[in-house]
Image (cartoon, helix red, strand yellow):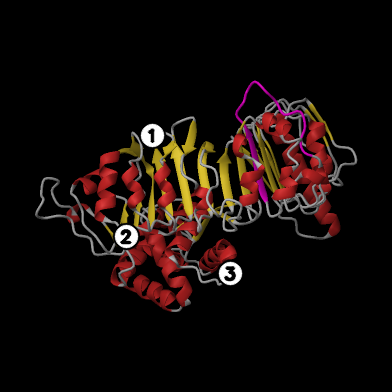
Amino acid sequence: MVHEKVIVAKCAGLPLAVVVIAGILLNHPDVVDWWKHVASSVRDYIARDATKTAEVIHLMYRHLPNYLKTCFLYLGVFREDFEIQVWKLVLMWISEGFIQNQDKFNLEVSAEQYLEELVHRNLVMVGQRRANGKIKTCRMHDTLREFCKKQAAEESLFGEIKAENLSPPTSSENQTVVDYQRLCINNVNLSTFLSGAPSGNCVRSLVACPKDASKLEARLVLNITKAFNLLRVLEMETLVISPRLHPDFCTLVLLQYVSISLEEGFIPPLFSNLLNLQTLIVTTKANTLEIKASIWDLPQFRHLHTNVSTIISAKPKGKEASQPNKNVQTLSSISPEICTKEVFVKTPNLKKLGVRGSISKLLQANDASNMFADLLQSLENLKLLNDDTESKVYRLPSKDKFPPQLTQLTLLNTLLNWRAISSLGELENLEVLRLKENACEGEIWNLGKEIFGRLKHLHIGRGDLMVWTASADNFPKLKSLELDCCSKLRGIPNELADITSLQSVALNCTNNQVAASARRLQLLKVERAKKAKIFDNFKVSVYPPDF
């Protein structure tokens, strides 16, 4: 089985590669040494049949619907073996104008459907899926990626900057002239490229995803504004801008998508000039991020993603101060202090909210956050991440004060008691519950008559939980259970084997008792399936496997 697994892994999901290698294996199907030889030479064999491979891929491409062709080719902008974050890919597709949907509020849904179509056609591989079944990460086979790069260059969709394209940094007469609408820079140092004072008035997108993170001096970022003043999409999150973003960056008024990393957590007021901005993604090494710009007044703004607690100091202003911005869908992660009525009135269609900071003060200040229900009627995903280690959350909002459409809830460092967690079963639409590290405290979680009627995924992270009692009645629709660093837990309830919908249990750094109970659960599921004469594809994964 060793050689078979190696061959399958190297084919990386490409059906054509599987066919080619299968034909070669037929020469000596029963000779182990032949399988070993083929396993070590998979890529060589595929390369030898390059003409046939290229013809078949081109045929597959020609038969794609037009709306999928640009989305497919665009995947070539990412570097080799890159695990693509789907949520970012979707937002990039939207900003590039690839998504055809007259309903601008559902562009993200359409983009995800496009990706599922490409997966169904075996052109894209799924890396990971989310608890709700949606694709979390994806990647491409090297052969397909090379085709995308070549075909995209022929169609002038995008071009890749290579070392041989660069002009010497000291050359003023021989600038690097770029005549592509979209650029990807993965294998060339971006600082070197920008030091050469590149020129490209036609460039609309710049995607830099180098393998190794590095610093990018702020003065070189100014060269982007000079060279590519019509830029709409900027993706360079792996490069840390040092020391801070220069205000002149805001002269790129056509920007729709910005993904950057900052050494200092500061966004200047002039960001308010980016009236076309749809997506802002900021990663910073600072403890907090301060946005001085009034993003509430940006008419096209849809998504804010940050890795730290974010303070948006500018208040809604002007004639539109009282008018809602119906485009805003994501605010994550923001500081509790800006979770105010004035902000939520501006965002009636908010779907995802992440709050990071002193969660206990937030709930106390707002009477257990009754504004959540009153003003966040469209909210589906809520994250409460408590950064205040000296305080714990004593209670959560009651059922009638939670957003009515909430399907996903994540808690971190809230130190809630298990009784409060049990009360979450009253949330009628809750499908995903993630209890991250220290979300709860208490050694016993005894579920009585509480029912999580629609819960499909339950994650329990590090804490002091030792005894967990529950039955199938408590989780009638549970599909997956994930336990992470639950080192004190004595086991998983046997009664969960009666949940017919349960498909998987994943354990990460638990203990021998928990691992044994998970395997016992698997045996019970098999026995019940045999008695009922049904097929049960229940899986248990344990890491490390020694447990």
Q: Point out residue 438 in the picture as x, y percentages from the top left corner.
A: 67, 29
In the depicted structure, whether residue 282 falls above or below residue 126: above
Pointers 2 and 3 in contact (C-beta within 8 Å): no
Pointers 1 and 2 in contact (C-beta within 8 Å): no
Residue highlighted by disc 2 = 230
In the depicted structure, whether residue 99 falls above or below residue 197: below
Q: Main secondary structure of the magenta part?
A: loop
Name the kind of residue labelled 1 in the image: Glu
**First of labels 1, 2 by sequence position:** 2
Start-end of magenta stretch? 380-397
Is residue 310 visible in the rendered structure shown here? Answer: yes
Say if the magenta span includes residue 382: yes
Name the kind of residue labelled 3 in the image: Asp
Q: Point out residue 284 in the picture as x, y percentages from the top left corner.
A: 44, 36
Q: What element carries label 2?
A: loop
The residue drawn where x is 61% and y is 55% is 324
- Going by the image, does 321 lie left or right of 27? right
Q: Point out residue 329 in the picture as x, y percentages from the top left corner.
A: 59, 54
